Image: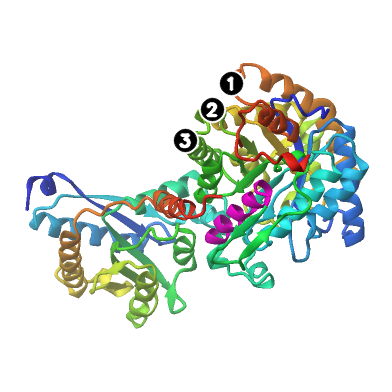
């Protein structure tokens, strides 16, 4: 690796959809960040992370959905995602899917924000019976959004938090973090797409052929 | 001579033309009542000294203005100096030949009081109703507008495009009044392509503004101004900018809030989302005293620069006609005179006044002007 790679931090943005305080979803998100950061260090990359908690954005997300009005705090959450080199997205499992709040955030997130974005997915739930929410809800949605979803996802049931370190959950976290870190390392710094510039370039091309 | 002629800024109203239930009375006007109310509102706008009336164009209930030039032609016959415009004319789903004809006739019957604001329209089903495809919205906009410009500027048009049948030897009738095409604004909520289109041709750019935070409008207007200069039409400050806004006023601001709140809370476009307080803090909506409206409106200049046209939405959310007419009285008597005076303060001399038919005619007569290519001596 060359010198510029080693000085530039890998920017991780963590989207966490837990509703309660403290939140087991946030707890899983934190553990994933810690593990990914450690794995990246091993690969010679330094990581910086930003947390986007969805609970305080609940009203702004709904306002954006109902009226299109995007408040500053939601705008800055969008910017954190757009500026990231990689995203860690964690939701509680509700009724065989992600929470409505979690989905709503992605529904108001500007189009193409997640294109070519490496994403590590995680979910929490009362029992391990809901673990396929990761494969049947999160992964298809993010694939639809053209994200590059890391192959190994992490589900944590309530009982997982009671087990000693070195437990199955910790192993799953480390394994998923290792996959995701290799993915991030391979993808490298992500150029932020300037959608406005892209739109303008295509408009200029159209206007060039239609001078009235 | 139009009294709006020498104005640096034009002030007026724009209507969506919605038929909305009055939530306080539980009554809904009929389409007939809404259309007559719209005419009364336009007449009142002239009576109280406003400069512009603009109507939306919609092709589905609960909206009534599907044929804007019919409405504007009627208003032209009932007014003397009011400028007649649209907000917006759908450049995508209307045939450009029909737009050229309709506004050419309107310009003649109104004696040079018409201009128009073009928009794409974002109601999906309208496109197939008119044989178009919403996925082609931007290419339709560019191609239709390119043709529209030529129809108003060239006597005989041979045209071939991708999205409309070709024209061979077509001549628009009637030719535009005095051979001067109506001034065109391009309206956008959040589409940078529209700012680019307006800048490319040196046309006006109207930022819808309502529902959007100032920072959003600022970046769209800045983009337009920068690209206007890029295309060689003048400095960024000389670009032609219009802004929307919506107001509800009573002399005591608490009365305004109390009276407007049920309309806000139940309006299809606002209701059940952000609170009235949030909306007034974050967007141009002002609910309060005339002084508050003046203060907030003057603040638009801080992020949009010196601009040419300010349109207010006043007849929305199911407000009864009587209330709307009262709003117009306050606008005309107390708000706009102050805005005219205050906006003129510190306005640089090289910021152009709002274009009108006469100013465009004069500019062309001087041999310079924005459209040196549109001389049609036989159209006199």
Where's the N terminus of chain B, which quadrant? top right
Kindly identify which residue carries mark 2.
B237
Residue B226's label in the rendered image is 3
Q: Quadrant of residue B125?
A: bottom right
* Foreground pick, B168 / A170: B168
Q: Is residue B345 left or right of residue B213?
A: right
Residue B247 shows up from this direction: no
What chain does mark 2 sit on? B
Residue placed at 24% from the left, 61% from the top? Answer: A31
Q: Nearer the viewer, residue B203 or B18?
A: B203
Q: Earlier in the sequence, mark 3 or mark 2?
A: 3
Mark 3: few, some, or many residues within 10 Å (few <14, many ≥20)? some
Quadrant of the rendering where the C terminus of chain B is positioned: top right
Q: Are marks 2 and 1 on the same chain?
A: yes
Residue beneath the point at 63% across and 28% down:
B367
Q: Residues within 10 Å of mark 2 (few under 14, many from 20)?
A: many
- Magenta span covers which residues? B138-155
Residue B103 drawn in magenta: no
Q: Which residue position is annotated with label 1?
A: B350
Q: CA distance from mark 3 to mark 2?
A: 9 Å
Residues under numbered marks 2 and 1 in contact, where contact means CB atoms less than 8 Å apart:
yes
Q: Is residue B299 above or below residue B104?
A: above
Q: Residue furthest bottom?
A: A129
User: Which chain does the residue under circle 1 lie in?
Assistant: B
Q: Secondary structure at mark 3?
A: helix
């Amino acid at each position: 690796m060359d010198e510029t790679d080693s000085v530039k931090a890998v920017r991780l943005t963590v989207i966490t959809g837990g509703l309660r305080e403290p939140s087991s979803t946030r707890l899983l998100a934190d553990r994933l960040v810690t593990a990914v950061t450690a794995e990246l260090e091993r690969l010679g990359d330094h990581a910086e992370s930003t947390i986007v908690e969805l609970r305080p954005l609940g009203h702004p997300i709904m306002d954006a959905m109902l009226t299109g009005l995007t408040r500053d705090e939601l705008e800055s959450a969008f910017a954190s995602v757009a500026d990231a080199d990689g995203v860690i997205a964690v939701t509680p499992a509700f009724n065989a899917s992600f929470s409505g709040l979690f989905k709503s955030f992605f529904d108001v997130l500007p189009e193409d924000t997640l294109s070519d974005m490496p994403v590590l997915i995680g979910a929490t739930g009362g029992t391990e019976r809901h673990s396929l929410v990761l494969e049947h809800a999160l992964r298809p949605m993010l694939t639809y959004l053209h994200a590059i979803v890391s192959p190994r996802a992490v589900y944590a049931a309530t009982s997982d938090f009671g087990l000693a370190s070195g437990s199955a959950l910790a192993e799953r976290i480390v394994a998923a973090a290792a996959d995701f870190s290799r993915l991030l390392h391979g993808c490298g710094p992500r150029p932020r797409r300037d959608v406005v510039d892209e739109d303008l370039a295509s408009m200029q091309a159209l206007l060039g052929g239609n001078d009235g | 001579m139009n009294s709006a002629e020498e104005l640096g800024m034009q002030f007026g109203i724009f209507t969506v033309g919605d038929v909305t239930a009055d939530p306080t009375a539980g009554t809904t006007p009929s389409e007939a009542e809404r259309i007559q109310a719209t005419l009364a509102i336009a007449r009142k706008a002239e009576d109280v000294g406003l400069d512009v009336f603009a109507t939306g164009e919609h092709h589905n209930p609960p909206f009534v203005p599907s044929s804007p030039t019919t409405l504007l032609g009627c208003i032209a016959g009932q007014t003397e100096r009011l400028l007649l415009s649209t907000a917006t004319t759908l450049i995508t789903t209307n045939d450009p030949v029909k737009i050229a004809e309709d506004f050419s006739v309107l310009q003649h019957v109104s004696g040079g009081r018409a201009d128009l604001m073009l928009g794409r329209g974002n109601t999906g089903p309208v496109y197939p109703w008119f044989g178009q495809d919403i996925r082609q919205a931007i290419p339709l906009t560019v191609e239709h507008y390119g043709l529209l410009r030529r129809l108003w500027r060239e006597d005989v048009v041979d045209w071939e495009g991708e999205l409309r049948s070709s024209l061979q030897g077509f001549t628009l009738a009637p030719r535009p009044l005095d051979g001067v095409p109506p001034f065109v604004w391009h309206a956008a909520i959040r589409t940078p392509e529209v700012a680019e289109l307006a800048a490319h041709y040196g046309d006006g750019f109207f930022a819808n503004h309502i529902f959007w935070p100032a920072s959003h409008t600022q970046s769209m207007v800045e983009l337009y101004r920068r690209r206007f200069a890029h295309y060689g039409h003048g400095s960024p400050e000389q670009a032609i900018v219009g802004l929307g806004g919506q107001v509800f006023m009573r002399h005591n601001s608490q009365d305004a809030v109390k009276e407007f709140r049920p309309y806000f809370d139940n309006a299809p476009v606002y209701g059940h989302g952000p609170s009235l307080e949030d909306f007034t803090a974050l967007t141009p909506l002002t609910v309060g005293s005339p002084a508050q409206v003046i203060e907030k409106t003057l603040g638009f200049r801080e992020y949009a620069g010196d601009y040419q046209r300010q349109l207010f939405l006043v007849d929305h959310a199911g407000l009864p006609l009587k209330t709307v007419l009262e709003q117009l009285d306050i606008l005309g008597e107390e708000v706009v005179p102050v805005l005219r005076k205050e906006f003129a303060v510190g306005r640089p001399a090289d910021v152009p006044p709002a274009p009108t038919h006469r100013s465009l005619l004069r500019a062309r007569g001087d041999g310079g002007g924005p459209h040196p290519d549109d001389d049609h001596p036989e159209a006199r």
